[in-house]
Amino acid sequence: MFFREQSTGLGLERMKWPLNTLRILKHLRSNARHDTMSISLQTGIPEDAVRLRIREYEHLFIKKHTSLIDYQILGFGQWHQIAIKLADTRVREFLNYIMNHKNVNSVFEVNGGYDYIIETVHRTLREYADFLKDLTSRFSIANKKEFQIINDIKRETFLSNTLEEWQDV
């Protein structure tokens, strides 16, 4: 189903994706709730093949099917990202804490002078301030930079664009 192109010279091989894979991914990325019948009708790929490929993709590269939520409408008016550089060597304990905290939406390991970016969602600024106070009292943080997300302009649209853009993927 997939085949590899020649080496990039960096020890990495570039994956070449068949057009039908891109067609299915485009539909899943634009709306993961599309059923196999509608994907089949819109792509011309038989429904059984769509179902089989999606099942295969779930084992290969689909991490999960999820919905994007407008937090503001649900009453969560404080949406923040915090870049953190730990001074603490208790990395496992730190990760366990943030991975299990109810207000932490996403965690990314990063470079550029920081260790992690944590995305949090809170009802109020007080709730956010309490989260930060608790975090900094539990762990030694060498540096942090906070960003309040004011407006969600574009999110999760990669590979949901026109197929012409991805013919060389």
Image: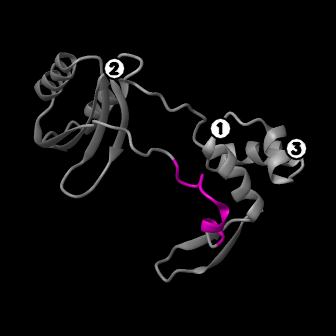
**Extent of the magenta region:** 157-167
Q: Main secondary structure of the magenta part?
A: loop
Which is more N-terminal, label 3 or label 1? Answer: 1
Q: Which residue is tagged 2?
A: 76
Q: Which amino acid does label 3 sit on?
A: Glu
If the image is split into quadrants, where does the N terminus sit? bottom right
The CA span between labels 2 and 1 is 24 Å
Element class at badge 2 = loop
Q: Nearer the viewer, residue 117 or 166?
A: 166
Which is more N-terminal, label 1 or label 2? Answer: 1
Residue at 74% x, 65% y: name it.
Answer: 18
Q: What residue type is labelled 1?
A: Ala
Element class at badge 1 = loop
Residue at 59% x, 37% y: name it.
Answer: 64
Q: Which amino acid does label 2 sit on?
A: Phe
160 magenta-colored = yes
Relative to 103, does residue 52 appear above or below in the rendering?
Answer: below
Q: Residues within 10 Å of mark 3 (few under 14, many from 20)?
A: some
Q: Are marks 2 and 1 in contact (CB under 8 Å)?
A: no
72 magenta-colored = no
Relative side of 91 to 34, left or right: left
Q: Which residue is tagged 1?
A: 32
Residue 52 spot, x, y in % from top left: 82, 45
Relative to 20, does residue 40 appear above or below in the rendering?
Answer: above
The CA span between labels 1 and 3 is 16 Å
Q: Which residue is tagged 3?
A: 47
